[in-house]
Image (cartoon, grey):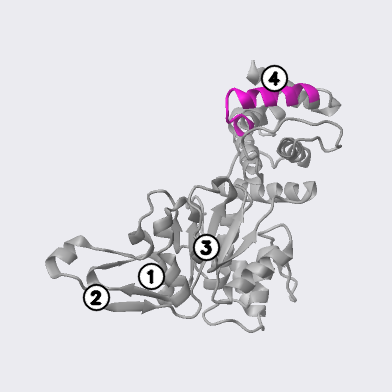
Amino acid sequence: MSTILRSHAEQLYQQELDELKKQDNDKKPANWKLSPQSVVLYLVGGKLKNGFEISPKYIGAKRLMEIAVATLTTDRALLLYGLPGTAKSWVSEHLSAAISGDSTMIIQGTAGTSEEAIRYGWNYAKLLAEGPSEKALVETPVMRGMKEGKIVRIEELTRIGADVQDTLITILSEKALPVPELNIEVQAVRGFNIIATANNRDKGVNELSSALKRRFNTVILPVPDSMDEEIDIVKRRVESFEKVMELPAEPPALSEIRRIVTIFRELRSGITLDGKTKIKIPSGTLSTAEAISVVNNGLAMAGYFGDGQLKAADLAAGILGAVIKDPVQDSIVWKEYLETVVKPREDWKDVYRACRDLMN
């Protein structure tokens, strides 16, 4: 049994990737491990000719994945854009794993991300001892990706300062990275491309310049269309979490997942599923990722502090933590939802009592 808390996609799904390679007879772009058709199959799931089942990594419109994969076969980079919790990082990781067999070439965008984190840095001990040389150069994931013809991931691009973002313009347009100190340049090998993610809640933080926007093809990942789709996503991700963490709890009943997803979808949309009651929207995003987190937390509570069976009392703290981000405004929204929507539902009495007890 592996002691790794979270394996990379290419390790976790190695058997699926190997099976796809065996069956893959379509044309592959240079340095791609799989053909574009097989990459999409890996993402959306399906059955191979030999009967092997590929699990879906993205549950949603297949066309979006086809557009994303097609973009990466061109000279344009890919920007995955959307609300928090819409699987942008998840899709980015699996695209890299299927295309390059390596999802680890990643730069985490923050306000402190510097130009050196994207272009290259220096080993200052060697630099002082020997002067500028290739041995003193510290390669970034971007430089390595260009040399090896692999996909590079940049998380939360709009969190990076605008001046640092623009260092990508030459890389994406010229497919070259100049190193003026050594009077050389690194030219990208075929297969190199960039997948960036951006959160629309960060709009206005560090807007992409028009020159940089032109170098990206943007694919907007929406929240799940239907209730069943979202339940399926939560169920699959929770099952995966349970296997890794080996929680002493039974798999959650589908009815409990349905209740969590219902609460999140209603508060997200501002109206009950039957369309009869309008409700206030809290300040948080209440994404699918947060619904997964609530169920996972509930399983830990049930396993270690309950009887191993997920119940409303185990979920209540997680629900409150997800919904109430602003202790004043969100508390009002939640109390109103609890009294007007949850309380009248006959089979939700346990949810009402558990949440009310925590609020008191």
* Residue bounds of the magenta highlight: 321-340
Q: Is residue 304 visible?
A: yes
Three-letter amino acid code of the residue under disc 2: Leu
Q: Neighbour class for label 2 at 10 Å: few (<14), some, many (≥20)?
A: few
Disc 3: which residue: 210
Q: Neighbour class for label 3 at 10 Å: few (<14), some, many (≥20)?
A: few
Pick whichever of labels 3 and 1 is earlier in the sequence. 1
Three-letter amino acid code of the residue under disc 3: Ser
Pick whichever of labels 4 and 3 is earlier in the sequence. 3
Disc 4: which residue: 356
Q: Quadrant of residue 341?
A: top right
User: Which residue: 49% across, 56% down?
Assistant: 157
- Residue found farthest to the left: 129
Q: Which dot marks residue 43? A: none
Three-letter amino acid code of the residue under disc 4: Arg
User: Which residue: 18% across, 65% down?
Assistant: 126
Q: Which dot marks residue 143? A: 1
Labels 3, 2: front one: 3
